[in-house]
Image (cartoon, rainbow, N blue to C red):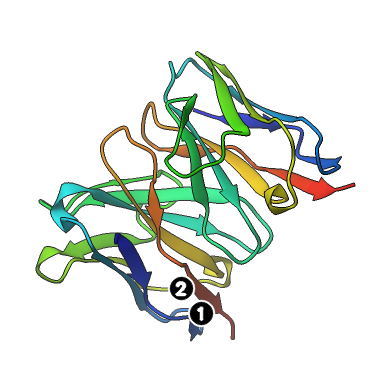
Amino acid sequence: EVQLVQSGAEVKKPGESLRISCKGSGYSFTSYWISWVRQMPGKGLEWMGRIDPSDSYTNYSPSFQGHVTISADKSISTAYLQWSSLKASDTAMYYCARHDYGDPFDYWGQGTLVTVSS
Amino acid sequence: IQLTQSPSSLSASVGDRVTITCRASQGISSYLAWYQQKPGKAPKLLIYAASTLQSGVPSRFSGSGSGTDFTLTISSLQPEDFATYYCQQLNSYPRTFGQGTKVEIK
């Protein structure tokens, strides 16, 4: 069974750093890309960027370029989304999703809620 | 590429036929997917390539369109279909989603 399991909810202060994770199982992790999607409270879905775990090549949305970093460790089938300096506006649910080039997002993680508050 | 869904919300009754539209700011061939999201849950893939039903999705869901104009149709709305629906273009990066259509109970 294909699964993407994300790390648990986080509560952080502005300016702090954070890394959240997404662990894939039940399929060949390096055969599919992983994208990250943000959903702010009560709002819609925003694509942040994606990584090819086979070579760690990344694409970012211009809206998120420079503010987040996407990485992966294929040895443990895990992708990451990280911030070096969080802002209150980063408060949101973050989802990872699996896909191939040009293909839809067929499996999603359960989401990680990130709350940034002083 | 911007995607504009209409309406933003709608109220319907069980058994109604519901149609949601998604318009792309430029042509995307058939590189469009539809997702369903229920409160507190991750989105679920319903349709891809504009009209191909994902495995396990009920046949009351259908999609059509190409180029810039697309539709998602629910032929007979069921209680479990009350949710928010999003379109997504898969033609180019950055991938973009429509703003969502919330389907509520009348």
Q: Residue at x 59, y 37 (%)?
A: B98
Looking at the image, residue B25 sits to the left or right of residue B55; the answer is right
Residue B91 vs residue B3: left or right? Answer: left
Identify the residue at image location x=75%, y=39%. Answer: B8
To which residue does mark 2 refer?
A86
Return the chain for callout 1.
Answer: A
Q: Nearer the viewer, residue A110 or B58?
A: B58
Against B88, residue A82 (above or below) is below
Q: Disc number at residue B99?
A: none
Residue lying furthest right: B106
Question: Is residue A13 depicted above or below A79 in this figure?
Answer: below
Q: Residue A53 placed where, x, y %?
A: 17, 55
Q: Nearer the viewer, residue A84 or A22?
A: A22
Q: Is residue A31 left or right of residue B55?
A: left
- At a point 70% along the width and 30% down the height, the residue shown is B75
Contact between marks 2 and 1 (CB within 8 A): the answer is yes
Disc with the residue nearer the chain's start (2 vs 1): 1
| x and y percentages locating residue B29 in the rendered image | 43, 16
Q: Position of residue A96 (x, y in %)?
A: 38, 59
Circle 1 crowding by C-alpha within 10 Å: few under 14, some 14–19, many from 20: some
Q: CA distance from mark 2 to mark 1?
A: 5 Å
Numbered disc 2: secondary structure: loop
Residues at marks 2 and 1, common chain?
yes
Q: Residues within 10 Å of mark 2 (few under 14, many from 20)?
A: many
Name the residue tied to disc 1. A14
Amino acid at dot 2: Leu
Q: How many marks?
A: 2
Q: Does B52 appear above or below A46?
A: above
